[in-house]
Image: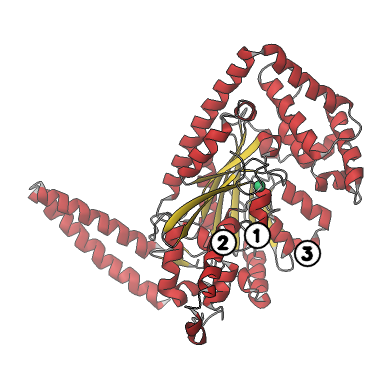
Amino acid sequence: MECQECHERKATLHFKHIINGQETKISLCEVCAKKKGYLSYPEEGYSLNDLLSGLFQKDGLNLSSTGATKSNQSQELKCASCGRTFSEFKKAGKFGCANCYASFGAKVEPILRRVHAGNTKHTGRIPKRAGKYIQQKRLISSHKEELKQLIEEEEFEKAAVLRDKIRELEKENHQNKEAGDNT
Amino acid sequence: MTLESFINEAISPWMLEDGPDKDIVMSSRVRLARNFADKLYPTSGNQEALEEVLQFIRKNYTQQEDTEQDSISFIPMKNLSMIEKLVLVEKHLISPHLIKHSDHAAVLLSAQEQTSIMVNEEDHLRIQVYYPGLQLRKALEEAYYLDDWLEEKADYAFDETKGYLTSCPTNIGTGMRASIMMHLPALVLTKQINRLIPAINQLGLVVRGIYGEGSEARGNIFQISNQITLGKSEEDIVEDLESIVNQLVEHERMARVYIYEQSEISLEDRVFRSYGTLKNSRIIDSKEAAICISNLRLGIDLGIIENISENILNELMVLTQPGFLQHYANKALRSDERDIRRASIIRERLNLKK
Ligand SMILES: [Zn+2]
Ligand SMILES: [Zn+2]
C-alpha cells in the first residue's frame, strides 16, 4: 500500500481517527507520519506512545479551536499535587503524577477508551506486596460468581460451604483493608 | 581493541543463546512501566523528585542485590560519555529518551544484559527483559520477578480499576509492552508483508521497522508489539501476540520455500551478490549494508552459504550503527567517514569466519 500523503513511499503506519463520530483510516509512510505530527520522537525505537499521544493531541487542538472550551478556560482543571492543567496534559499527552488521574476525572475516561479499544477497567496484575487487599477482593468476587452458579444448579450443600468461605474471606479482608489504610 | 573483543561488546551475552524459532524471531522483549505512588513523575520536570527517586534506587537496589541468575549494576547516565550512551541505545538497553533527560537518570543493568531497568525515563521505572527467539512468557516471568523485587520497598502508583498509573495514558493498566523482533526477508520479497501488516494492525497490534528512519523496515527487521494495555491481562496480551507471531513465522517459512523453489538460481544470485558486496566494498552506507546483511542471513538460513555464524545479522546490525562505529574508532566520525569504517568492519568480521 502506498502512502496516502506523498504517494511515493510504502505506507507502514496506519491510523484510525474519529472525527465528529466518523471513523476514518489513513495509511502513511514514516516520513509523512512524522511531518504530520503523528510521531513526536521519530528517532526512538519504540515510538508507539508518542504516536498515540500525537493522536489525541490532534483532538485537543480541534477542541480548543472550536471556541466551545474557551469559556471553561478560566476554571480549568488542575492537578493539586503536581500543578499540571488539563490542557497541559492534552498538549504533552503525559500526566505529571499519580493524582492526575483523579484530578482530571471523567475527562480522562474518553481518552483511555479511545486508546484502549473501549476498555476502561484493568484486569491484569496487582502489586504483590501492597495489593493483597485487592487480590483478595478479586478472589471473593470470583467465588461469588461460582456461588451463583451453584445455586442455579441447585447444589445447595456445596453452595453453603462456599458461602461460609466467602464470609471468612470477607472478614479477613476487612481487616486487611483497615491494616492497609492505617499505614 | 581487537575486533573479537569489540564484537563481544556489541553482542549481549543472551543473544548468543539458543531460542525457539531463532532463525526468524531475533528476540522477545517485555517492558513494564512503573511509578512510585508518592513521587511526582519524571514528566513533571520536578528535579528534586527525580533526584530523590534516583537516590532511593541507588541506596536500596544496588548493594549485593541479585536476581536469580544475574548480578545487577547501577549506572548513572551522568557518568557516561555521549558515545557510551549511544552504544547502550543501539543495543536497545536504554531509550533515546533516557539520554535526552539524563541528568537524574540511571540504568540498572544485569551482567548478561538480558534485563535493564531504566530509572527516570518517562516513568520512574521501566523494567525490560529480553529473551532470544520466541520466549515472551519467560520474559514476562522474569519481569514479574523484578517487579516484585522493586515493589518490596516502596508503594507503586496503582489504582484498582485503572491498574498501574503510568505517565502516558497509552501505557495505563498493565503498563506492559510486549514486543517481538523478527527477520522477514521472504515475506518482503514476495510482497506478502504488505497484506499482512494491515491485518495485524486490525488485531490491535503494531508493526514497525526498527532500524533506519525511512518508510521501510531496514534489513527486513520488524517489531511487533501490543497496542492496548488496559482491559486485558498480561497473559492474554502475550498469548495473542505469540499466536500472531507463530503465524508470521509459518508464513515466512512457506515464503522461503516458495522463493527457493521458484527460482533457486536467482535467490543464490541475490545472496552471493550481497555477500560479495559485504566482502569487497570500501564504502557502504547503513541502508545498503542492512539489505546485504539481511540477504546474507537468509542465505545462511537456507544453507546457500556455509561457515558463517547465523548470529551475523544481530552482530552486524549492531556493529554498523553510528554509535558503535564511533566507539570502535574511539572518536567522533562524520557520516562519510562512518561509511568507510562500516565497510572495513564488515570485511574484517567476515574474514573472522566462525
Ligand atoms: Zn508518505
Ligand atoms: Zn498530577
- Element class at badge 1: loop
Q: Give me the C-alpha separation between circle 2 and circle 3.
A: 29 Å
**CB of residue at label 1: within 8 Å of ligand 1?**
no
For marks 1 and 3, give the one nearer the viewer: 1
Residue found at x 55% / y 75%: A87
**Mark 1–mark 2 distance (CA, rounded to whole Å):** 8 Å
Q: Is residue B317 left or right of residue A130?
A: right
Q: Amino acid at mark 2?
A: Ser
Callout 1 crowding tier (Cα within 10 Å): few <14, some 14–19, many ≥20: some
The answer to which image quadrant residue A174 occupies is bottom left
Residue at which label 3 appears: B78
Establish if B246 lies above or below A114.
above
* Pointer 3 local density, CA inside 10 Å: few below 14, some 14–19, many at least 20: some
CB of mark 1 within 8 Å of CB of mark 2? yes
The amino acid at mark 3 is: Lys
CA distance for labels 1 and 3: 25 Å
Judge by depth and name the residue closer to the eye, B237 or A182: B237
User: Going by the picture, which residue comes out furthest to the bottom?
Assistant: A74
Residue flagged by tag 1: what amino acid is it?
Ser
Compared with B269, B313 (above or below) is below
Name the mark on residue A40: 1
**Chain at numbered mark 1:** A
